[in-house]
Image (spheres, coloured by chain):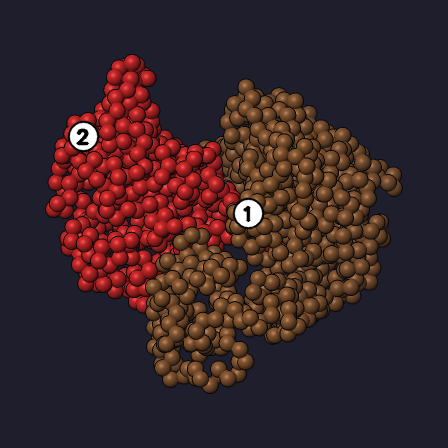
Amino acid sequence: MISKFRPFDVIAAAAILVWCIPSDSFASEEKRPLSFVHDIVPILTKADCNTGACHAKAVTGQRGFVLSLLGFETQEDYEHIVKEGKGRRVFAPAPDQSLLVLKAANIVPHGGGVRLEPGSKNYNKLVQWIKEGMVYENESDGKLTSLEVKPQRMSMEVNTEQPLKVIAHFSDGSSEDVTEMALFEPNDKSMAETDDEGLVKVLDVPGNVAVMVRYAGKVSVSNISIPLGAPVESLPPSKNFIDELVFSNLKAIGVPPSPVCDDATFLRRVSLDIGGRLPTKEESAEFLASKDPLKRELAIETLLSSPDYADYFANKWTALLKNQRESKADIVANFAFHSWVRDGMLANKPYDEMVRQILGATGTIVANPAVAWYKRVKEPNQQLEDVAQLFLGVRMQCAQCHHHPFEKWSQHDYYSFAAFFSQVGRKPTPIAGEDLIFHKRGVAKLENKKTLAPVTPAALGQEALEIPPDDDPRLRLADWMSEKDNPFFAKALVNRYWKHFFKRGLVEPEDDIRDTNPATNPELLDALAMHFVENGFDLKEIITVITSSNTYQLSAFPNEHNAVDRQNFSHYYPKRMQAEVLLDAVDMLTGAKTDFANLPSGTRAISLPDNSYNSSPFLKVFGRPEGASVCECERVQSSSLAQSLHLMNSSDVKGKLTKAGGQADVLSKPEAKDEVGIRDIYLTAFSREPTAEEMTIAKGHLVKPRTDTNDKPVNPQLAKRQGYEDLIWAIMNTKEFLYNH
Amino acid sequence: MNSFDSSSAFERCAGPFGRRGFMQIGLTGFASLGLPGLMRLQAENAKKPKNERTAVIMVWLPGGLSHVDSYDPKPEIGSEYRGPFKTIGTKVPGTRITELMPLQAKIADKFNIVRSMNQTAGGHPAGSMQMFSGDSDTRDKPKPRLPDWMSVANYLRSKGEARTNPLPNYVGVNPTPANYSGPAYLGNAYSPFSVTDDPSRPNFKVPNIGLSDPAETRRLSERLALRKSLDKMERAFDQENELGALDEFEQQAMTLLTNSQTRDAFDLGKEDKVTRDRYGRNQWGQQLLLARRLVESGVDIVTSTLSGPLCGRVRNWDDHAVNQHQFDALRFRMPNYDQAVSALIEDVYARGLDQRVLVVVTGEFGRTPKIKYGRSTGAGDASAAAGTLQPGRDHWPRAFSNIWAGGGMQTGGVIGASDKRGEDVVERPCGPGDFLSTIYHHLGIDSAKITIDDFNGRPTPIVSSGKPIPELIA
């Protein structure tokens, strides 16, 4: 936020102040005195006075003036405005000389610039409220019960505008148009923009977007569907409910899907997504040659029963479960925990069972590796925050210190949830830093840090529980999570997995599921969650359903209409291979295996148990996470200069290209044939045969005469070898290689 | 910046003592600068071209410089505190530093000394994190929780106006300690481009910068041409912004590797002999020369850590008695330090970079004012044989000093003061938040207003407390 005021404005503003305040003329329009709660707090919120960067900055506020974040603590704010600041902030005898007014209008220099234009409706209201003696609340005021936004649901053409209207409903049955004082925010700013007056402007991206509306601590949402309206003449056949729901949405919004991809693309895609690896050239050749009509289903089944699947998904989950190496001594615990997760994946342990075993873990890490989670995540606050975000897709962090701004969650909800972890007992063991975890007998309760009153455990949106002293409250939490109608647990997982395969969650970010951030295809999210519950939280099964759908198997190439689509899955969205997968792929392509310290040679990057191997510059540069956060966003998938430099010129990659016994070396042996070598490289890198044109270009490069630094011709075998090094380098740097597409 | 903005910035950023306190400091430290002088400075500042890109060089002293043996000497104190070093006068009447820094004494009018820095963490990791990122946690952690100011500035600058300069925007010339600093939730893309080799070595080379062998350059270009002729997927991606970014980075990498200008920026051979000698023909001198060369070539953020064998046996400034003899270590170390730092400051002014480039020299804390004797754990440079009793000083975050130059600021001042022993700040305390806000201010970053979302999507302020130190901002 940068203030945009100019000196001229201030002069003009001062003039307006002197001449134009009709302070008496509009008082009669209001039946009752203005109240702080009802009228003033929304003005302060709308003017951004109480954001975290301004006067709601933790503890200090700005220059001694502190407001609660987004006005959730009206009583405190009232005290600060009316009673603090030596009475200068508000001065009823000369309301427009109140510091609050002078600062807000930037008449007295204000770090935040002009927040209220003198003469504006909100400015006048503030002045009037002071003049009327600063009423906190009128007894006759009804309490705000709900917020309604009109239209609640609508369809808008691309590049059109539509004003929203916001109605506040009060407990006394009255209602009021509060559009001018409400705040508007689209959940996808690349699709829609809003202004202060509630005008929604839809851009040129088709799909569903939600505009969140906030007023006085309440939220509401307007759901907007933006059709493209292109003709959808043919759809791929529906193989399951996913296809039915995705394709019917595409038809409804007029976005024609791309066709189903070819076999080579499918095999490469699904191997990368399930097994975290490229198919070998033998696997590719066999798959391409097979005439079995069910070969895709078979490939999925084979991958899911392979150890690669367990490696890849253990890699995913252990980072989220913070299997972090902080000291050398962690090695045993981290290996044990990684193996425990991996074994669970291999054996296809039901997801609810896995979560229950982590939450309810007791004993020592040696006896029960799931306990390691409690080694990393020590405090009840951290435990509840991680559990909520990772397993429920709910971000509770905000509610530790203040009411969640976009949610119903209060500090009471926060500490009630944390109370499930209040009876986690710890006893030191002979291994430093590793406690024995047990259930400490007693009635679970925790202090609400805001009210200082004790609260008993309550799951999100549930009644508080009285848990007998002998029962472990963590198991009650696990019970609630695995209930069939739990509104969070299954949704969070299927959304997370959807994102794994499709690059984009049905809700984005994948762990921020809330009413004000709806799914782009809500019916699909519900159906996936229901399917997952009905199949006993079977992880391999949900992956099978997803990957065998034609939706997953659509081509990445857009057609003439659907290139603009980024959320309806009308074509496959290419994703860059993640650090570990890419390193393994580069190793395979160059025939030069990376060695990791103290691990058996041949260990692949996707099997690494923890973050201590991120000392590998390759893994670091390509964003392998440190296991510091429960959010998948810790894994950075964006490109960077360092990545380009690494692939183009690092000694690491150069060493792989030139390694004795590596791919270039082997393929350039006198007895090797160029066509075979080029074909091998293509099958390895892309799971497909080279086209005739590619074969010509590649062969041409291999036979090019070469000179050394002194411009002397090099011997033919060395020239051939350098030709292969170049070819492999070039292939490695193509988007076709770097991306899963 | 127009004049109205800058005066409101002044109003906003007045120090904890308000205007009166500032004028008092003006009398002691800024002998030449009354309030009218300040106003004039602001007016000049207002005339500065708006879009000139400011830059910062931070010289990092890992382990912490003993403040009482350097910039904040206490000659009157008893021998259980006082080191062996005499004080000397400087170019600024009334300002004295120790005899270890005669070259800086001669140019004391070109920098400011802050004698009232303080933070609250006694360990290297937490203390460093307080200074790098403003994390107020006093406990040591294995990795930083918050991004350091360098990554933040790199990130914010990369979001702003597009840069045309192919050089990386943040370079660590011997970067700050990896476990104490870093981009945290900003991601590795905002890490420094690292120069880890000793630039004083004759075969000094920066990997990935300007290939020196033309044959290598030619081969890389051929490879790239081959890559382009084989890449069939462009069409599938052309709607995706990230692919555009990938192409851009590839182009930038290619420029870095093949463009002679980028190679020149790192080539100290292009400096004349006199200049190279002036900085000192050793690791630290050439590091700081390279730092200056880089900001001159358009790099915005440069850090340079003065560590290694020039420090003494333990290769850093952590002068516990068990590590090295505190005073022998300073005798061993300070001539090179003094030469390099004074050369950098002088050079920044001589080349007219002093408005655009801010230089700050600091460690994570000072050293215990009371001398502590302990037995050496090993012989080496500045350390006696194992078992020998020798003097040392331990960690001291409650009061320490750092110096600031350039940045368009008025120089020659002393800001704040510690008590008679150098143990606690008694005047004008400056914390990590002030330290960081001052740097951000120079970079045109309004640190009080900017938040960046952490992993949980929570908007996190880039500095949670503090204000730019008014005497150190233009």
Question: Which chain can be seen in red?
Answer: B
The amino acid on which the numbered mark 2 sits, given as a three-letter code, is Arg
Q: Is residue B123 visible?
A: yes
A529 or B308, which lies in front?
Answer: A529
In which quadrant of the rendered view does residue B44 lie? bottom left
Indicate the chain on which mark 1 is placed.
A
Residue under the point 30% across and 34% down: B396
Horizontally, residue B52 falls left or right of residue B23, namely: right
Label 2: how many Cα within 10 Å (few below 14, some 14–19, many 20+): some
Badge nearest the viewer, 1 or 2:
1
Q: Residue A14: image x %, image y %? A: 35, 78
* Proximity of marks 1 and 2: CB atoms separated by less than 8 Å: no
Horizontally, residue B131 falls left or right of residue A39, namely: left
Question: Which chain can be seen in brown?
Answer: A
Mark 2: which secondary structure? loop
Numbered tag placed on residue B82 in the rendering = 2
The amino acid on which the numbered mark 1 sits, given as a three-letter code, is Ala
Q: Residue A549: image x %, image y %? A: 80, 47
Mark 1: which secondary structure? loop
Label 1: how many Cα within 10 Å (few below 14, some 14–19, many 20+): few
